[in-house]
Structure formats: C-alpha cells, structure tokens
Image: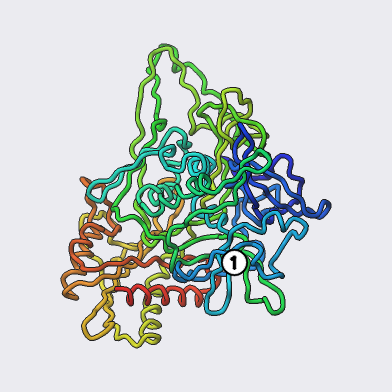
Amino acid sequence: MTDIEEIGIRGIPKESKLLILGDWYKKPGEGWRVVCYFYNHKLGHFRQPLPIDLLPVLTPGTIFPRTSTENKAQGWTETFKLPERSSWQKVCFKDLPVSLKRADEFFDQFEDGFLYRIETNKKVFWLPLIEVARMLFFHSSEVVRAAINQGNTWQLGRAWSKDWVGEVELSSNVSVRYINSLQYRKFFTWLFFDTAVESSFGSIHREINLHSRVVEEADRWTFDFIPPDLSHCEMSIAGFTGRDSEENEVYIREIRSISGLKSPNLDVVYFSHPDDDVWLEKEREGDNDKTEKASKPPVNIRELDPETKPNAGRKRHVIRLGRSGLNFDVEPDTRRSPRQVKALPPETESTLDDLEEQSPEELASLQQGNDKGKIPRADVDTLDPPAHLEAPEKIRFFKAMLLNLEQEHGWKIDSHMGDVPRMRCRSQHLVAGRPRRYCHAFVKRDESTIIQLLEIELSSKVKKDGTTEPESLSTLLFRAPDTTVTFQGILDELMMANKDEGLNAMSWKRKYIAQNTSVREYLGHPDNKIKSEQDALESWVARAAEKVIGM
C-alpha cells in the first residue's frame, strides 16, 4: 500500500484548492463526470470536470498535489450533535447567506446544488449532500462505481447471517487488500447488514434514473440521495463561518468524522475473498541452491491520470489517503477468515498477487479496468482508524459522566466498582497484571424505571507485530427486572470466549444480552478528535441522557 509523498491529479495545476463539487454530466458512450471548481493564486477560479472514479480523492478544501496522509483540518473546526433528521431543511446553494458564497463568477452553474440547512440552539450549519455521501460511502473507486452504475452492493460482495454471526464474501472487484483493513471490514459490515444504509446507498442510482436530464446531447444531473438516519450522531467538521451578522452561519466544507452510527446486531462477522490465497510450491531438486529473488522496490505513485483507462488485470495498487473516520455505537467484531492454501503443480512458477509489491510507477488510474489499458490500476483507502480517548482514562471519565448526569437531570444514581470475573478468557481479566475493574451503575429515572449501566476498564493490547492497539468496548445500558443477577450474568458472558461461535472474551454477547434484558442500548465513548476534555465530557453526558430518556 502506498503512503503519500506527493500525489496530484494530471491536468490540475499545482497549489490548486478544490472548493466545491458541482453538477454531473455524461456524454454518449462515456462515464459520468463531476464538474469541480478550484482556486489557484495564479489562475484564480477555474472549473475542471473529472471522472466520478476520483470522488474518494475529491475532498473539498484539499490543495493538490496532496503531500500528506495526515487528517489536517482546513479552516474552522468544531464538533456538534446532529438534531432529529425531521428538522433538517433541504435547500439549494442559492439559499446560502451571502458571506458563505464562493466562486462568484461560476456560482450560477451550481446554485441549484442541494444542501441541508441544520439549525441547532446557537448556529446554523449548511451541509452539501454530496459531502454526506462522500463521508458515508465514497471511500473507494470500486464502491463509487457500485453506487452510481449499479445501485446495489452485488458488485462488492455478498453477505448472509445466522444466529448472530455474519459472513461476507467480497467480490474480486474489490482489492483483496481491504480484507486486511479493520476500517473497511467495519464499513462493509455496516453497508451489507443494515437495510436502511443499503437502501440509502442504492438511492444514488435511483435518483440518477429519476432526475437526470438531457442538455445539449449529454445527460446532466444535480447530485441527490436519501441519507440514512443520522439523528443524534456526532459530526466533526471543517469549514468556514459567515461574516458580521452571519457569524453564526457555518458552511461545512468537509466532514472529518461521524460518531454514533448504529452497528448491526451481530456478535461477529467473518470476511473472505476469492483471491485471498497462499500458493505453495512443491519442492524440486536444486531449490535449496537457488538464491532468493531480489525484493521488488515499493510502489511510488505520484500522479493520478483522470483520462487514461488502466489495464484490466487483478493486480492493483492501493493508495492510502487517510482523511475520515466512521465510528459506531458498538465496535463490530470483524475477522478475516483463514486464507485458502493451494499447491502449485511441479515446475510451475508462482506469480505476484495483490499482497505483494510491484515495480515503481509514477502514474496510475482509478477508473474501471480495460483490456486495452496500459497504465497501472489503482484504488484509494480513505478511512482513518478512530482515534479514541486513551483507554486507561475511560473508567475515570465514566465516573465524571455519571456525576454530571446526576447534577444536570436530578436523577438518583448509585454505582459501585468491582473486578470482572475470571472465566474462559486466558488473561483478559487482567490489566497490567492486576484484576480488570468494572463499574455498575443504576439510574432511577422515575418512580417505576431503573436504567442500569456497565462500564469496563480498558487498556492497550500488544499486537503480533509489536505495535499497541487501544481496546474498544462501548458502555452498555439496559433495563432488567433486577439489579443484582442480570448484570453479573452479562459480565460472565463478557469474559468468556466461545470458540464454537467464534466469540472472543471482552466483547458484548448481543444474543445473550437481548435474551436477558427488556431494553438495551450501547453508548460509544468519546474520541480524541473532540478538542477538549470538557467538550468530550459534555457530549458524552448529553448522549447518555438521551439514551436514558429514550429507554
């Protein structure tokens, strides 16, 4: 996988900033293109149509060529909680406040583009619909093509589930590298197993069929789709504010992360890929005398060609453009199925597969492969792993959240600490050699309703490659007829590994919890993209209160 040193788009002058994505068009016999509006200090404002295959790269606010994979914010940044979806107003760019308008000489070309006007207590946010789709779905060129050309997930893979266990077999259209990416496995779990999300994904294609129009012998379309319900999710954004009397108006140029997406109700999801093979050569006489083949140098793609089709071979480069994060209310437990081990016939040479590096290349294409294509085929990885609050701090933070919850809402809250039980969990019941702690709390919401909360102490685990990874386990809220037995049973299940069902210790057993509670909710922890600890605490209190009230 390629990390960026510098990567640009052929035909886009250096130091050009992408401002806005406009209408789409398609000429006979060609694919869809999106009109992009840039600003360059020497050229001023200019427009450039680009293939929709480049959408994962086209983040507004980006200056080309890109010189870093780091998710650096451009302009005004903040995090806010989205209100009920029913309160969002669908408007057009021509409805923007005057001081939020850009590229005046081209404005009439995209003034009918769609935005959401989202009003909160203190501010009004203006959010382009195409930016919502980019954040939710446009993480890879293959995914973009599936959404726009097919309107379903069949080109990406197939999925099925039974007894709280899911199976996903990715298509060979998708790079085999994605099976190694935890973020992509979580994304595909959400896309394949949430029917509302899958319907939203398909709505892009439906809107094209319903509302594209013919202008000067070309199909034209103003981007539109139906997002899934994002009510009460947290959105971290970058953009700019209005001037003078419009200073409380905020234009969202880029969504940096969304937290609180509802995870499908599955305990574990297994991923496989038809090309995920290990080829073993049978030993031949003299093999031991052969020298190792020289390792090939890493790929170095410096420019993307928007006009040339790539070759149709399976081999492809994946370029890492870490820019955005999707965070779920419960972290899905996703795993790679064992690779298929195959043997080559004697005297047969093995060939490079997707997991091996290939020769250095300066140029590549993100478009669909073509039999006559000559340059390398590439795809893009735009998903950043979530940057969570440090694990050891969460149990302390949880106690502070309970105190604020009690003070702000007047609920009576009792809590106690204890050690998690030692079950079939190897050493998962230990943190730094001592017993792992839990906090059990119950909130007396009213005279007849008690909501229970379970928070587990987390730490960082050392992976096989020597790197550390923070544990991630959401807070559990539930209602049960007792306050002593049920939570203990949940803790017992939490700390047990069930090899037959493929369930690890330190993972909520959703099936057991659903069978033994009347109502249950999962509350995600704050991530450290929120600027300050106080902001993170206030956000966590507000989301916890919303869960308690809704139960």
Q: Which residue is mark 1?
A: 126
Out of 100 and 166, give the one closest to the viewer.
Answer: 100
In x, y percent, where is residue 67?
Answer: 68, 49
Report the residue that reaches farthest toward the right. Answer: 42
In x, y percent, where is residue 106?
Answer: 74, 55
Way the structure is coloured: rainbow
In x, y percent, where is residue 60?
Answer: 64, 55
Is 202 situated above or below 354?
Answer: below
Whether residue 342 sits left or right of residue 68 in the image: it is: left
Q: Amino acid at mark 1?
A: Trp
Out of 496 and 196, give the one closest to the viewer.
Answer: 196
Q: Dot 1: what SS?
A: strand
Is 110 situated above or below 240?
Answer: above
Q: Residue at x 37, y 85 (%)?
A: 409
Whether residue 302 sits left or right of residue 468 in the image: it is: right
Out of 396 and 53, give the one closest to the viewer.
Answer: 53
Q: Quadrant of residue 416?
A: bottom left
Q: Residue at x 64, y 39 (%)?
A: 218
In x, y percent, where is residue 3?
Answer: 60, 44
Whether residue 527 sits left or right of residue 48 in the image: it is: left
Q: Residue at x 56, y 51 (%)?
A: 322
Q: Residue at x 51, y 75 (%)?
A: 535
Is 386 situated above or below 234?
Answer: above
Q: Quadrant of the C terminus?
A: bottom left
Which class describes the residues within 10 Å of circle 1: few (<14), some (14-19), or many (20+)? many
Whether residue 95 sits left or right of residue 531 in the image: it is: right
Out of 40 and 295, give the one closest to the viewer.
Answer: 40
